[in-house]
Structures are given as C-alpha cells and as structure tokens.
Amino acid sequence: MAKAGYHHGNLRQALVDATLTLITEKGPQGFTLSEAAKAAGVTPAAVYRHFAGREDLIAEAARQGYEIFASLMEYAYNDGKPTALAAFEATGRAYLAFARRYPGHYMAMFESGVALNSNPALAAAAMRARGVLEQAAAKLSEHIPPEKRPPPSMFSAHIWAMSHGVVELFARGGPGLRSPFPPEELLEAGIGIYLRGLGLLPPDS
C-alpha cells in the first residue's frame, strides 16, 4: 500500500504516516529512519528526497499535529459561543480529545524533543494553536478593567499547562495515576478554581 502511494507521488505523506504509526507503537525515540522507510515500503535513501533526516521527519509529523490541534481548538472555541466561559472550557476538552484521538501526533509534538524554532512551519503551526487559547483568554477577561486584567498570554499558558498535566496523568490510558473522576471533570473544576482565583469569575459561577 505504501509503495502504491510512492508511485502516485505520495511518498512524503506515506513516510509521515509510517512515522506516526511507529511513534504510537514505540515512542518518538523508539525507531530508526530505516524502520520508517521500511514501513513506508521504500529504501532509506528515498527518505532523503523529502526529509533531511529522522528529526526532520518527526518535525513534519509534529507540524501536522499542531495543524489538526489548532483546527480542533478553533472548532471547540466556536467564536466564543455560547458564552466566553463555555467556549474557554471547550478548548480544554478539545485538548483532551486530541491527545486521545491522535496519540502519534501528540507524542511527536510534546515528547520527541524536536525544537519548535528549528522549523519555521512547525513554529507557525504551534503559534496558531497557542493563539486560539490566547484569544479565548482575552475574550474571557475583556470585562475586567485593563489595569486589573491579567495578561491573557499568562493565564492561557497556565490553562495549557493544566490541560497538559491532566492529559499526562489521567487521560492517555497509560500506567499513570488513576483518578476517581473523569479527566474532563478534573480539568473543568481546575479551570473554574483558577479563573475564580484570578477574579475572572464570580464565586458562585
């Protein structure tokens, strides 16, 4: 099947797809460039027609992951509807859903060690994803007077870190800690507590 893709000019994507499968099965450091080439049905030399090496191949998998991730976040945010808070919480749930549905992409993005700034396209895709959460944060805080308003980039980064922590500990189905609560409930409660602490939500919301 991979060889057929190669004959139709799809070798580049066939290599990325093979890499994502290997990452899911073995982790981002658990396979070689030769294994990725073999899985795609080509020789290792053929890989260099499209990628500078293994890290470049993983970086492309990560870039595609960030593009999917950003699109899911944008869909979840839904232009701030029905309310700024509901939309903000929806982006957190989208984070959990992405990690579950796209494990290979997730690991390429966050566990491969590939530097975002080493690849302009990768950096742009990551910035797009981060921008969705910052937009949601800005909308959520716009009712606060400017002099009392926390920087949206700051508390959106905190929510990103909280989301990532819930994913890593409770949502990926690995040997991590087991929670008596669903990951979505943990994240939603954490977001609520955090936002109330910043004064962005009334105590009874």
Image: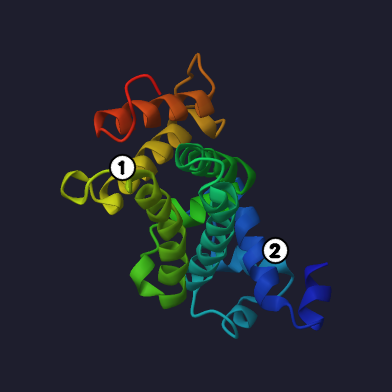
| Colour scheme | rainbow
Q: Which of the image's four quarters has the C terminus?
A: top left
Do callouts 1 and 2 mark residues in contact (Cβ within 8 Å)? no
Q: Which residue is at the front of the view, 183 or 35?
A: 183
Residue type indicated by callout 1: His
Q: Earlier in the sequence, mark 1 or mark 2?
A: 2
Residue 34 lies, in percent from the top left, at 59, 68
Vertical arrangement, residue 54 with respect to residue 83, above or below: below
Above/below status of 126 relative to 148: below
Disc 2 is placed on an element classified as helix
User: Residue 173, labelled with which disc?
Assistant: none
Residue for badge 2: 39
Between the residue at mark 1 and the residue at mark 2, the CA separation in whole angstroms equals 39 Å
- State which mark lies toward you, 1 or 2: 1
74 over 173 or under it: above or below: below
Q: Position of residue 179 (x, y in %)?
A: 48, 18
The residue most toward the top is 180
Rendered location of residue 43, percent (x, y): 67, 77
Q: For residue 30, say whether it is visible.
A: no
Which residue is rendered at x = 65% and y = 69% of the image?
15
Amino acid carrying mark 2 in the image: Ala
Query: What residue appears at the point 42 percent right and 50 percent down from the top-left corner?
Result: 136
Q: Which mark is residue 158?
A: 1
Left or right: 44 in relation to 121: right
Q: Is residue 196 something that shows in the picture? A: yes
Taking the spot 81% from the left edge, 82% from the top edge, the residue there is: 7
The answer to which of 146 and 40 lies nearer the viewer is: 146
**Outermost residue toward the bottom in this view:** 49
Residue plotted at (33% across, 49% down): 142
